[in-house]
């Protein structure tokens, strides 16, 4: 801007000097008696406006050429961009592309030519305590002007059918497959006998399974939760598939014979414990009946052990001299 001002003042000075020179020549030679000022004004008045416009255009072209030359010289002298500047330019470009894609995602289908999007209705205050919505008149739409949206057909998915383990037919889903991951269709399901559900307590007592066998051993047995039918306030029941519980018990015990032997041992131990408890209760009852012969000691008995006896390598025992109680212990 400063350069243009300077150039303008330079052209103005040259024009004034030319006018003054022409005026002197006319005054000296051709038109004596005419003042320089008047002659200058007359010459300036004789120039046409078309010539002035041409001179201004030539000056503007010269100024444009000078500016282009200076800009090219500055561009040639400008040092190359650094890596940080190039990275910043690339980040700005990526940000602009992301903004453009976000706008396209917000409005993926632009309005067709000649179709104007309808804005929200204007709200007008009537002054009577309520508002009116003034809808703008919709522009007339040309037939076929709206863009037709064509969706590609959906792909055809091939479903992996399951095969029933009982009938061998294919099926998509079933109750046992959904809850217990057991490949049996609903038509072959026998909820009363073969595919019966048992509780967690029954699985542990009848098939001698522990909590770790049900919850931690892979694969973990699946179950369903139901309310207790005996009392709704009690805890919920965990129901397992009986076939899966039998399969897990065979994995733990190895075979049906070993499982049966473990059942018998546990049954015998339970009978012994029951008999022992029964004998204890009978003895207490006899003592209660024969109260005249049995007297309860009021004082606390303190054992008086005799000399220790060596039973085994590290096992020793002592016997109370009063009541005959034997104390067995080990020495390290």
Image (cartoon, grey):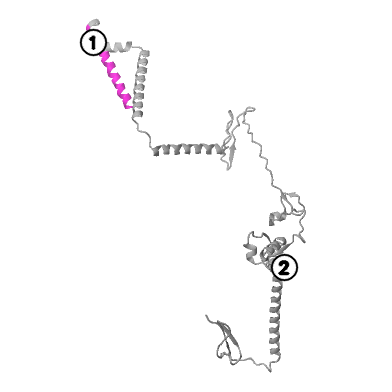
Task: Give the residue displayed 30% in from the left and 11% down from the top.
Answer: 43
Residue at mark 1: 24
In this image, 98 relative to 141: left or right?
A: left
Q: How many marks?
A: 2
Residue 304 pos. (x, y %): 56, 91
Q: Specify the label residue 15 is tagged with.
A: none
The quadrant holding residue 236 is bottom right
Task: Give the residue displayed 69% in from the left and 57% down from the top.
Answer: 180
Dots 2, 1 in contact, CB < 8 A: no
Q: Is residue 2 magenta?
A: yes
Looking at this view, is 180 or 16 the one in front? 180
Stretch in magenta: 1-28
Looking at this view, is 2 or 43 the one in front? 2
Mark 2 → mark 1, Cα distance in angstroms:
143 Å
In this image, 189 relative to 125: left or right?
A: right
Residue at mark 2: 257
Secondary element type, mark 2: helix
Earlier in the chain: of badge 2 and badge 1, it is 1
Residue 120 pos. (x, y %): 57, 37
Mark 1 packing: few (<14 Cα in 10 Å), some, or many (20+)? some
Residue 177 pos. (x, y %): 70, 54
The quadrant holding residue 209 is bottom right
In the image, residue 74 above or below residue 325: above
Residue 166 pos. (x, y %): 76, 54
In this image, 301 relative to 21: left or right?
A: right
Task: Give the residue displayed 71% in from the left and 80% down from the top.
Answer: 275
Looking at this view, is 270 or 156 the one in front? 270
Where does the N terminus fall, quadrant-wise? top left
Q: Is residue 253 magenta?
A: no
In the image, residue 142 above or below residue 27: below
């Amino acid at each position: 801007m400063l350069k243009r001002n300077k150039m303008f003042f330079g052209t103005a000075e040259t024009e004034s000097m030319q006018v003054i020179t022409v005026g002197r020549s006319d005054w000296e030679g051709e038109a004596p008696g005419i003042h320089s000022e008047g002659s200058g004004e007359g010459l300036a008045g004789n120039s046409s406006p078309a010539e002035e416009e041409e001179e201004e255009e030539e000056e503007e072209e010269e100024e444009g050429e000078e500016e282009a030359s200076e800009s090219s010289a500055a561009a040639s002298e400008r040092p190359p961009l650094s890596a940080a500047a190039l990275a910043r330019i690339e980040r700005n470009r990526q940000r602009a592309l992301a903004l453009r894609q976000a706008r396209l995602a917000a409005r993926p289908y632009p309005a067709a030519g000649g179709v104007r999007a309808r804005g929200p209705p204007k709200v007008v205050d009537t002054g009577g305590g309520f508002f009116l919505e003034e809808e703008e008149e919709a522009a007339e739409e040309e037939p076929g002007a709206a863009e037709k949206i064509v969706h590609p057909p959906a792909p055809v998915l091939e479903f992996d059918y399951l095969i029933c383990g009982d009938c061998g037919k294919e099926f998509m889903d079933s109750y046992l497959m959904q809850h217990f991951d057991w490949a049996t269709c609903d038509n072959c399901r026998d909820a009363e006998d073969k595919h019966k559900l048992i509780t967690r307590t029954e699985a542990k007592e009848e098939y001698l399974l522990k909590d770790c066998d049900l919850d931690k051993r892979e694969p973990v047995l699946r179950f369903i939760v139901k309310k207790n039918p005996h009392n709704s306030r009690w805890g919920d029941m965990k129901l397992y598939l009986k076939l899966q519980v039998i399969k897990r018990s065979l994995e733990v015990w190895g075979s049906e014979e070993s499982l049966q032997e473990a059942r018998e041992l546990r049954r015998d131990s339970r009978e012994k414990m029951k008999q022992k408890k029964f004998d204890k209760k009978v003895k207490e009852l006899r003592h209660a009946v024969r109260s005249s012969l049995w007297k309860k000691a009021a004082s606390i008995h303190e054992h008086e052990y005799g000399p220790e006896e060596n039973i085994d390598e590290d096992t020793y025992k002592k016997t109370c001299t009063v009541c005959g109680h034997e104390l067995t212990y080990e020495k390290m």
